[in-house]
Image: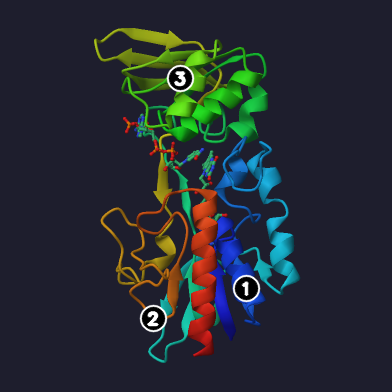
Amino acid sequence: MLDLAIIGGGPAGLTAGLYATRGGLKDVVMFEKGMPGGQITSSSEIENYPGIPEVMSGMDMMDKWPKQCMRFGLKHRMDEVSRISKRDDGVFEVLLLGGEVVEAKSVIVCTGSTPRRSGVKGESLFFGRGVSTCATCDGFFYKDKEVAVLGGGDTALEEALYLANICSKVYLIHRRDEFRASPVTVEKVKKNQKIELVLNSVVDEIVGDNAGVNGVFVEDKHGNKRDLKVPGIFVFVGMNVNNEVLMQEDGKPLCELSENGNVVVDLKMKTSLKGLFAAGDLRVDASKQVVCAAGDGATAGIQALEYVNE
Ligand code: FAD
Ligand code: NAP
């Protein structure tokens, strides 16, 4: 039986693993369905992680994190977890996608969040064929071409700036005339000559053919319509909480969740269920920053260590 199962290998999961193993827990496995690193690996640049003055890509920043954890004995299994449950004898069961069940004394859930879809007509049809949620991954396909970006938060504006370095023009489409993004980023966007703000506007439809997207129909609040002839649109309209692993067979969650589906935790990252901890973006009131997710992970790792040793 594992001492600790960590679900998710983003900044929260990796840091939880670092603290738990370095603190002395022996059998600690981090289940990560993809490569460790988390959602920040899709970011073109990060400049607000303390102690790293250089601006770097999310991929570069996360590169060394797994190596540091493995040094203290954290094991990584590239597996997707379907469900976490707890038996009457207090043992947790981690059900993997392939059907295997792994027993653990304690669990830290760090499954983070996933880019939300806008629901615009044509978005699903052309997803991966001109519709993208990752500028770092797909931006290069649009070198010297015009693209559209949908959204008004930090992600949309930062990625619009990144795309402006590669593409000939970026239409930034936002449904209001005020942005949710931080003022410093808004200023940079407004100053960028390659970014055209398409404000108070919604996307009516993403259109294309067998080759992929070839246009985006936009309408402003006065009913004025525009046909943007772009081969690509990047959708950054927020994130969904990855809480599916907590849902039991009867449809109820394993621990208390907020109205929005975030895991309710106390300051020690303890959930409403003993031995189950949650850290990072999926918990209530998360600041949704790498440094905060890492901090949560450290707290959860220390608490899991205490729980198992007790
Ligand atoms: P995540 O990073 O989301 O990691 C969760 C991990 O769990 C993922 O690797 C996922 O594959 C895995 N997982 C999910 N479900 C399962 C499952 N069922 N089984 C196994 N594995 C699973 N923050 C900053 O501080 N500065 C920035 O500049 C910044 N820029 C950003 C730019 C972009 C484009 C985005 C999307 C986010 C940005 N953020 C930034 C926010 C930051 O990335 C997150 O706050 C942080 O990654 C949260 O870490 P986490 O470990 O909680 O979750
Ligand atoms: P977000 O802050 O929730 O912003 C989502 C944006 O999409 C909003 O502007 C919203 O419009 C718009 N939107 C939502 N649904 C839409 C729809 N169906 N159609 C059109 N537009 C829609 O999401 P995010 O930008 O991904 O950021 C997520 C979190 O990560 C935030 O807490 C953010 O601060 C953080 N983050 C931080 C950094 C950084 O620190 N540098 C970078 C990236 C992300 P409205 O504004 O009208 O609601």
**If you read the primary sequence from the N terminus, does the residue marked by circle 1 or circle 3 appear first?**
1
Q: Which mark is residue 196?
A: none
Residue 68, horizontal then vertical, whole percent: 72, 63
Q: CA distance from mark 3 to mark 2?
A: 46 Å
- Disc 3 packing (10 Å; few <14; some 14–19; many ≥20): many
Q: Earlier in the sequence, mark 2 or mark 1?
A: 1
**Which tag is nearer the camera, tag 2 or tag 1?**
2
- Pointer 1 residue Cβ closer than 8 Å to ligand 1: no
**Is the residue marked by circle 2 packed among few (<14), some (14-19), or many (20+) residues within 10 Å?**
few
Residue 29: numbered disc: 1
> Residue at point 59% right, 19% down?
164
Q: Give the structural element (helix, strand or loop) at label 2.
A: loop
Where residue 287 appears, as percent x and y from the top left, is 42, 50
* Residue type beneath disc 2: Lys
* Amino acid type, callout 1: Val
Q: Secondary structure at mark 3?
A: strand
**Against 152, is 194 above or below?**
above
Say above or below: 75 vs 171: below
Identify residue for label 3.
172
Question: Where does the N terminus fall, quadrant-wise?
Answer: bottom right
Q: Which residue is mark 2?
A: 274
Q: Considering the numbered disc 1 on the image, is that residue within a helix, a strand or a loop?
A: strand
Relative side of 254 to 130, left or right:
left
| Identity of the residue drawn at 53% across and 74% down | 302
